[in-house]
Image (cartoon, rainbow, N blue to C red):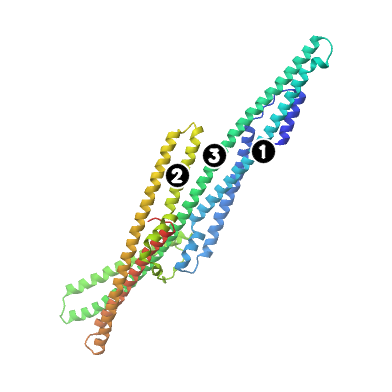
């Protein structure tokens, strides 16, 4: 209802002396219509953004992807991230609509207050005029009584309509209280979705980083199997010559052939796994699974940032930034608001609301303990992977020494070409094992670092 409507109502009251009811349902119908239009506009906007994101992805993700680019690519292109962004935007628009409706209802309430005040003035004026009739009119008492009865009727009409306006004001106030609760609940839900969205985005980034490392580990293992297969084939050729000379049996030849076959099967499995990892990576970037994507092989030694003496300080960062703790804190705040409302609620008693709030406090403490324990496990995992990497490095140094001796022996004619190649193969295998250990160290450090940023593992 606006001020023009109020003016028209008052005019009709004064002229025709007929009861007029101002119903809050009029406001509801206008609000519902506006909400439906706004929701339609938001849905169209979301669809446009989604279609634009799908169109742009094919041009954004071509070429070689570096490890350092993963986070930005996920945040720009991942479908789940884009959907969450649009969902938050839609909720923000709904919140704006509720606030606009609250402003409209406040204006309507002001109009009702003005209308009620005008009714009061009219009633007081009529009562004063009625009281002064006998002093202002000389004549038949019956005439005076007749005029008084007309005043009484008019005052009654004004009082009736004033009561109707007061009832409308009460209904409008209830709507305002309801909208206040809706705005509070929507703001609460939006805040939770923002935290969940950030947590989900970080998890997706880590998952993509993890896939990247897995792909490189598979590629290293593939290289190792290729080298082993080639060496085994050369050994088989020598073995067949030895068989002709009667130095080994056919059974030994068959055994070597089976080993080569096993290596080739393992190689095919690794290639299938690589293809699957790359397909999953593509889907995370919003590409088709078979999109031509190349992953760079370089991985910077980010573990160099790890300092095992900073555990207590890092734990403080973990507890401060953790998304699970943040969500549980928001849930506790929700229960606190419900407790604040329970005094005037027909749906929940105050005692029940207190118990629910107490449970959320218990859950919050439990979440903090769980996060601390998870961080401790990740910390121990980093230490373990660091030790393994250092051990593989020592083995690599030893393999390098063995290869150097083999080269010297080969130059002196003490070992054959095949024996030298076998020593080279052992060195290459150890080099790959060291790379794999380093990748696992990086993987564990990334978990440690992501926990400091808010994730839980």
**Total label count?**
3
Q: Name the residue: 48% across, 55% down.
A: 198
**Camera sees residue 22:** yes
Secondary element under disc 3, as helix, strand or loop, is helix
Which residue is label 1 attached to?
A: 107
Q: In the figure, 415 relative to 258: above or below?
A: below
Tell me the crowding category of disc 1: few under 14, some 14 to 19, or many 20 or more residues within 10 angstroms, Cα based: some
Asked if residue 192 lies left or right of residue 13, the reply is left
- Which of discs 1 and 2 lies nearer the camera? The answer is 2
Asked if residue 113 lies left or right of residue 45, the reply is right
Secondary element under disc 2, as helix, strand or loop, is helix
- Any mark on residue 437, and which? none
Residue 379, by quadrant, is bottom left
Q: Quadrant of the C terminus?
A: bottom left
Which mark is first along the chain, 2 or 1? 1
Which mark is first along the chain, 1 or 3? 1
Q: Quadrant of the N terminus?
A: top right
Residue 234, by quadrant, is bottom left
Which residue is label 3 attached to?
A: 181
**Camera sees residue 421:** no
Q: Position of residue 18 (x, y in %)?
A: 72, 23
**Alpha carbons under labels 1 and 2: distance apart:** 34 Å
Q: Position of residue 427 (x, y in %)?
A: 29, 77
Marks 1/2 in contact by CB < 8 Å: the verdict is no
Which residue is label 2 attached to?
A: 332
């Amino acid at each position: 209802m606006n001020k023009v409507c109020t003016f028209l109502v008052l005019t009709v009251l004064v002229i025709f002396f007929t009861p007029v009811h101002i119903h809050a349902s009029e406001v509801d119908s206008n609000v519902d219509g506006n909400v439906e239009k706004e929701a339609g506009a938001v849905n169209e906007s979301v669809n446009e953004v989604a279609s634009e994101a799908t169109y742009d992805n094919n041009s954004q993700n071509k070429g070689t992807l570096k490890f350092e680019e993963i986070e930005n690519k996920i945040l720009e292109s991942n479908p789940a991230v884009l959907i969450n962004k649009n969902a938050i935007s839609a909720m923000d628009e709904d919140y704006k609509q509720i606030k606009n409706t609250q402003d409209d209802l406040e204006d309507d309430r002001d109009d009702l207050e003005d209308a009620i005040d005008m009714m009061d003035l009219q009633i007081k004026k009529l009562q004063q005029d009625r009281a002064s009739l006998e002093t202002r009119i000389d004549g038949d008492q019956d005439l005076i009584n007749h005029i008084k009865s007309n005043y009484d009727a008019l005052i009654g009409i004004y009082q009736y309509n004033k009561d109707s306006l007061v009832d409308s004001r009460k209904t409008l106030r209830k709507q305002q209280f309801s909208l206040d609760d809706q705005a509070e609940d929507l703001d609460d839900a939006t805040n939770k979705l923002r935290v969940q969205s950030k947590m989900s985005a970080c998890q997706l980034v880590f998952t993509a980083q993890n896939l990247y490392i897995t792909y490189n580990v598979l590629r290293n293992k593939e290289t190792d199997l290729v080298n082993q297969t080639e060496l085994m084939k050369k050994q088989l050729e020598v073995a067949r010559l030895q068989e002709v000379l009667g130095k080994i049996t056919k059974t030994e030849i068959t055994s070597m052939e089976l080993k080569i076959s096993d290596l080739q099967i393992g190689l095919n499995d690794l290639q299938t796994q690589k293809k699957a990892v790359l397909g999953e990576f593509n889907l995370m970037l919003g590409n088709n699974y078979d999109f031509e994507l190349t992953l760079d092989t370089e991985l910077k030694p980010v573990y160099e940032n790890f300092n095992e003496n900073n555990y207590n300080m890092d734990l403080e960062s973990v507890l401060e930034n953790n998304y699970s703790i943040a969500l549980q804190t928001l849930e506790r705040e929700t229960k606190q608001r419900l407790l604040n409302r329970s005094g005037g609620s027909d749906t929940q008693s105050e005692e029940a609301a207190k118990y629910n709030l107490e449970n959320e406090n218990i859950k919050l403490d439990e979440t903090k303990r769980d996060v601390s324990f998870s961080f401790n496990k990740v910390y121990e995992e980093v230490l373990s992977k660091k030790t393994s990497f250092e051990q593989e490095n020592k083995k690599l140094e030893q393999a390098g020494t063995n290869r150097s001796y083999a080269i010297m022996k080969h130059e002196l004619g003490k070992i054959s070409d095949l024996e030298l190649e076998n020593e080279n193969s052992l060195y290459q295998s150890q080099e790959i094992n060291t790379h794999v250990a380093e990748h696992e160290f990086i993987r564990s450090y990334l978990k440690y670092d992501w926990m400091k940023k808010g994730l839980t593992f």
